[in-house]
Image (cartoon, helix red, strand yellow):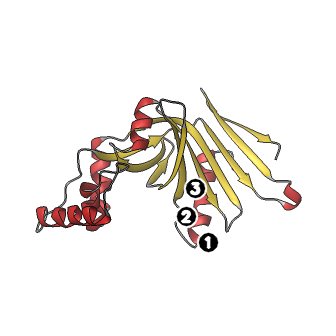
Amino acid sequence: MTTDPHALFEDWFAEARASEPNDPEAMAVATVGTDGQPSVRMVLLKGHDPRGFVFYTNYESRKAGELDATPRAALLFHWKSLRRQVRIEGPVSKVSEAEGDAYFATRRRDSQLGAWASDQSRPLDSRATFEARFEAMKARFEGGPVPRPPHWSGFRVEPERIEFWQDRAHRLHERRLFTRDADGWIEGLLYP
C-alpha cells in the first residue's frame, strides 16, 4: 500500500485518465472572500508534483482576488467512474513567470487569444461584445506568436492535507488522510 500521497495521487489520476469520459483533470477550487463568503468553481489541473497542484487563471478574476486576500484553497477531484474523490487543502502561491510562460506556450492559439479577450468574472453586456474582442485579438496577433498576458498565470496549492476517499459497499467507505508535518507525511484513517 502506497504511503506517499503524491505517488498515490498519481496512481489514481492515471486510472482516472483511463476511465473518466470527460475531463479527468477537472477539479473544484474553493476560496473565500474577504467577507467570509466561500466560493467554488471548476478548473483544470495543469500540473502536479511534490511542490503542489497547479491551475491557471486570469489574475484579475474573482478567484485570484480571493486567493490574493486569503492565500489558502481547497481542491476536490471527483472521479465518478471510479467512485473515488481526492480532497486537498493548503496554502497557495503564484507560479514563477517562467512556469506561466512555459504553460501558456502549450495552449491552443484560440485559448491564448481568449486569455487576452476575456475580463474574467466581470460583467459582460452581450456575447457579441466578447466575440468582437476575440476577433480584435486575432487581428492584433495575426502572423506572430501570442505572448502570455501580464494578468494571466498560475497558482500552486501546496498540500497540507490530502484525503483519498474510496466508495465501499453499504456506505462503509474508506477514507485515508495524509497530513503534512515537518518530517513528511502522517497517514491515518477517518470514519466514513
- Compared with 6, 185 (above or below) is above
Instruction: For label 1, count other residues whose C-alpha is less than 10 Å away and answer few (under 14), some (14-19) or many (20+).
Output: some
Picture coordinates of residue 36, whole percent (x, y): 54, 31
At x 30%, y 51%, the residue is 119
Residue type at tag 2: Pro
Q: Nearer the viewer, residue 159 or 182?
A: 159
The single residue placed furthest to the top in the displayed view is 182
Element type where label 2 sits in the image: loop
At x 82%, y 59%, the residue is 168
Residue type at tag 3: Glu
Element type where label 1 sits in the image: helix
Q: Nearer the viewer, residue 60 or 35?
A: 35
Residue under label 3, please give it: 10
At x 36%, y 41%, the residue is 95
Picture coordinates of residue 117, whole percent (x, y): 25, 57
Residue under label 1, please give it: 19
* Residue 145 located left or right of residue 44: left
